[in-house]
Amino acid sequence: MAHTISPGTLPVGVRTRLGESPWWDGDRLSWIDILGHRIHRCRLDGSELESLTTPAAPGFAIPTADGFVVGLPDGVHRVVDGAWRRTWQAPHDAARLRLNDGKTDPSGRLWFGSMTYDETTPDAALYREDASGVTRVLDGVTTSNGLGWSPAGTTLYYSDSPLRTTWAFDHDPVTGDLSHRRPFAIDPPGQFPDGLTVDADGYVWSAKWQGGRIVRYAPDGRIDTVVEVPVVRPTSLAWVGPDRSTLAVTTAAPQDANLAHELDGAVLLIPTATSGPVLPLPTP
Ligand code: BGC
Ligand code: CA
């Protein structure tokens, strides 16, 4: 079922060039501007807006008890009261690769990936951080992007954008180990899977970069719903609000000015008939 919507928007004056990493902490929504080097946070009515400048392009920012954990091109950093500290150095050439999307799994382990700036060379990777440090879990990645777990934590969904592929893996919720990799969804040419999130029914919502749509998949990979949005580059999604039934969707400006829309760079708010989980803060 496909339908076009006129979404609400987060009522703030902020517009991102490349919005990403929306995160709901129960009270406030945070999101980033990768190209604008910013982390923003406010309440859903737009009040209490605060913005933090990052020292380089952030790929993700996730709130912690006292600040944020942030993926910068050269590794993972923690920022507390404006003081930045690198807690893990990426083993890549930060001139050619940078960190991209990151998320916590249901146990609070931090997962994040890298991407090649050219988005064609498969030199990037997926990493997992837990109490014992950072493990490289996958190689041969081109643009590491959306991450999300089934409600029981036994399946990981994961997108590599230029391959137009979202994979499913069996995920051991105790150890974090992955096995049984299989394609879950493949997009048509010209559309790329960016951020994703899983709802309480185990259905997967995927933002389609260049596709101007959010697609909801059943756990068997069947397309359940297509929500067409007015912007061509929706990038990532988070469940927000008191009952977490609204999707907050970050957006980016298109490369082609002919595809520009007044909502480019806004955070879209889309009510749904379902809801999503509370994502844990990172544990280490
Ligand atoms: C990245 C962009 C990339 C896009 C599509 C986003 O997550 O931050 O740099 O172009 O995905 O692959
Ligand atoms: Ca992304």
Image: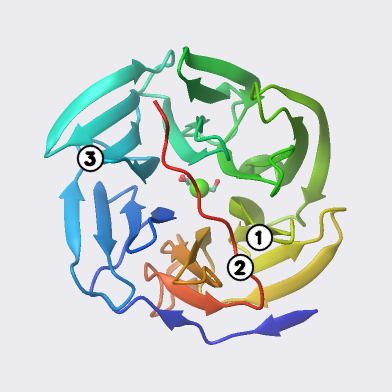
Question: Sequence order check: which comes first, mark 2 or mark 1?
Answer: 1
Q: Which of 245 and 214 is in front in this view?
A: 245
The residue that mark 1 highlights is: 199
x%, y% of residue 159?
A: 65, 42
Report the residue at 79% width, 50% height from top. Answer: 185
Residue 275's mark?
2
* Disc 2 to disc 1, C-alpha distance: 6 Å
Q: How far apart are marks 2 and 3 (CA)?
A: 27 Å
Q: Is mark 2 within 8 Å of ligand 2?
A: no
| N-terminal label among 3 and 1 | 3
Residue type at numbered disc 2: Ser
Q: Report which quarter residue 188 is drawn in.
A: bottom right
Structural crowding at the residue carrying mark 1, measured as other residues with C-alpha within 10 Å and reported as few (<14), some (14–19) or many (≥20): many
Q: Is residue 230 visible from the viewing direction of this image?
A: no
Question: Does 53 sit left or right of 217 as displayed?
Answer: left
Q: Can residue 43 be seen in this view?
A: yes
Q: Residue 10: give x, y in percent of width and height.
A: 35, 75
Are the residues flagged by discs 2 and 1 in contact, CB closer than 8 Å?
A: yes
Q: Which residue is drawn at 35% across and 56% down?
A: 31
Is residue 82 shown above or below 217? above
Residue at the disc numbered 3: 66
85 above or below 241? above
* Disc 3 element: loop
Whole-Å distance between the Cαs marked 3 and 1? 28 Å
